[in-house]
Amino acid sequence: MKNQPDWQPTAARAALKCRAQQSAFVRGFFSQRDVLEVETPVLGRCGVTDPNLDGIFAQVSAQGVEGGWLQTSPEYHMKRLLAASVGSIYQISKVFRNGERGRRHNPEFSMLEWYRIGFDDEALMAEVADLVCSWLNCPRPKTISYRQAMLDWAGIDPFIIPDEDLRQRCQQWLEPEQLEDLSRDGCLDLLMSFAVEPNLGTETPVFINQYPASQASLARTSNVDGFDVAHRFELYIDGLELCNGYWELTNACEQRARFEADNCLRADAGKPETGIDGAFLAAIEHGLPDCAGVALGLDRLLMLKMGTRNIADVLTFPLERA
């Protein structure tokens, strides 16, 4: 029959079996460490202000609520639980990000997110390594600072390079009119994506840490060698970014200021502003315990386990077949 929809899954049964084994492994890992599994809403009243993320708005009408957002991460709701003194927690959830589809991206994907009370970023990096290396049976990661990675593979010092020189360095990937609208961090992200990331974790897994403070998002910051850096890390294996973790910011006033700054950046980029999540800020103000948290892409972890470079190979029905 002509124009019949392609109804078959893109993942083979072996991938489905491996995903089930991975979920069981994750749950066993956290059970042994007495970390509580939780569930939080997939549909929330607020989205995120992060200028690098675009949420998906959902039309809904119930008890005066006229719409909601499919969550890009369970972070805000999980931190509200932390503020309610539930202790260390983890979650396996579906999350949604608009405009992301490719060999490594699907707008709907599976995320493992967890928060450890009393941990800093260094302690959480060690636990991430425990989980990932045990599942993949791979060497433990080495750690390279963001600055050193940029020096090694992009040939620039990201903290001192002048803006004009930075833009010139990015000319090979964007047209001049596109570069004019790109912020300094946007240029750095471009260099990270094209010049640095393909080289990361090709021989052994690599943690990148000490990102510029302007890229801290929800992480604490401190001064290292005269530069303000974020207590943030990402893990790379075979050039694939696997997770993003923070020693979490616990100051509500600072967090509000960052949200407002995010919305200014969104406006500069021609994106609509996003309402600030008042319930989340109220929880932080009530008291977020000292903790570290990380979000890990489970589909990408499964891709590494299966030895594939295409996310469709580990999904039953990606967007075009859903």
Image: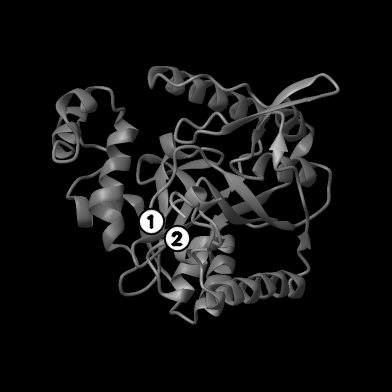
281 or 198, nearer to the observer: 198
Residue 322 image offset from top left, x and y in percent:
56, 50
Whether the residues at callouts 2 and 1 have beta carbons within 8 Å, the answer is yes
- Residue with the most extreme bottom position: 137
Q: Which residue is mark 2?
A: 311
**Measured Cα–Cα span from mark 2 to mark 1:** 6 Å
Q: Looking at the rendering, which quadrant does residue 67 occupy?
A: top right
168 or 232, nearer to the observer: 168
Residue at the (72%, 46%) spot, across then down = 78
Residue at the (79%, 61%) spot, across then down = 36
Q: Which mark is residue 253?
A: none
- Residue with the most extreme front position: 1
Residue 289 image offset from top left, x and y in percent:
74, 46
- Residue with the most extreme right position: 63
Q: From this view, report whether residue 15 is shown above or below residue 121.
A: below
Residue 194 image offset from top left, x and y in percent:
25, 50
Residue at the (52%, 41%) spot, across then down = 97
Q: Which residue is mark 1?
A: 103
Q: Amino acid at mark 2?
A: Ile
Residue 235 visible in the displayed image: no
Residue at the (23%, 52%) spot, across then down = 195
